[in-house]
Image: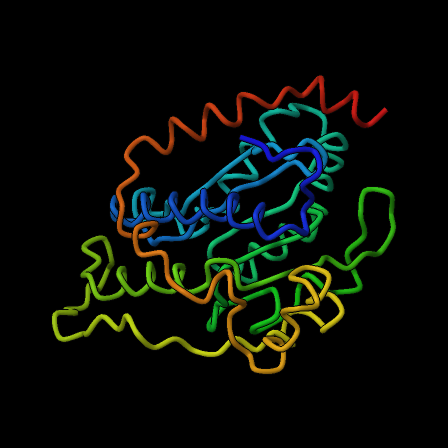
Amino acid sequence: MTLPDNENDNNVASHKMYMGWAIKLAKYALDHGETPVACIFVHYKSKQIVAYGMNDTNNSLTGIAHAEFMAIEQIKSRFPNDPIGFNQFCSDCIVYVTVEPCIMCASALKQLNFKKIYFGCGNDRFGGNGTVLSINQDKSTVNYNGVVYKQKSIPGLYRREAIMLLRYFYVKENKRSPNPRIKLDRNLDKDNFPQINWSHYMNNNLFGQEFGLHNLSHFQTMDDIEEFSTIDWNLIDSTYDNILNDLQLETKHFKLNEYKRLKV
């Protein structure tokens, strides 16, 4: 599924569509016993979904099986024995992920030159895109042309939905945990949400470019822009048993040969 040609990556409608896919995949992860974190990778020029991933740490018992790494492996499979082509392709992709990448994933996304990172809620303990560290802004990483670059990172897309999915997870007992905690006494808060300090992730100029000058007041008040200020309960309370098949079909629509022609 793609947007019309006149839609660009700074359009809130496109943000909602792509992050909507990620939220649905995160809900699928939650329904199958995983931490509800998921991502969608979108090719910048064609506006097509090229990869997706969700956390698989509980199922695989592997600490590095984060959503971003799952999606990266899908892209890597398109470029066997072609690390330069792989790296160049990553630089043309935008990441939509429900929760701010951890420091490990933020470093991988930066080193692989992904064009831009959009995420839902911050990661208070391990966030690598502004909350704890700003890996995306480091001055030591170079792109495939050897040029130092800073990676833009924009939060707030379906932020409250992403928070609610995590709350759903943390009030449940994780039976795959080495030391499962009894959580029956935890209450599910559906009404209160922390403020978002936009300045941790971007300046007001970038905020205006991404969300429009009419939303600049939210930068100062540290609240959600109008499009994401009300929770879409249907989005996060529905089930998505077919989403893996749907996303597989979406990624099949992207033809690598067409991408290569775009680069000429």
At 52% from the left and 44% from the top, the residue drawn is 18
Q: Is residue 254 left or right of residue 150?
A: left
Q: Is residue 261 left or right of residue 125?
A: right
Q: Position of residue 151 (x, y in %)?
A: 72, 57
Quarter of the image for the C terminus: give it: top right
Q: Position of residue 185 (x, y in %)?
A: 13, 75
Q: How many marks?
A: 0
Q: Is residue 55 above or below residue 171?
A: above
Please, which colouring scheme is shown? rainbow
At 72% from the left and 35% from the top, the residue drawn is 45
Q: Is residue 1 above or below residue 172?
A: above
At 54% from the left and 34% from the top, the residue drawn is 51
At 40% from the left and 59% from the top, the residue drawn is 162
Q: Position of residue 226 (x, y in %)?
A: 51, 66
Question: In this view, which residue lies farthest toward the top?
Answer: 257
| Front-lying residue, 107 or 208 | 208
Q: Position of residue 158 (x, y in %)?
A: 46, 58
| Front-lying residue, 238 or 216 | 216
Q: Is residue 170 left or right of residue 96?
A: left
Q: Quadrant of residue 187?
A: bottom left
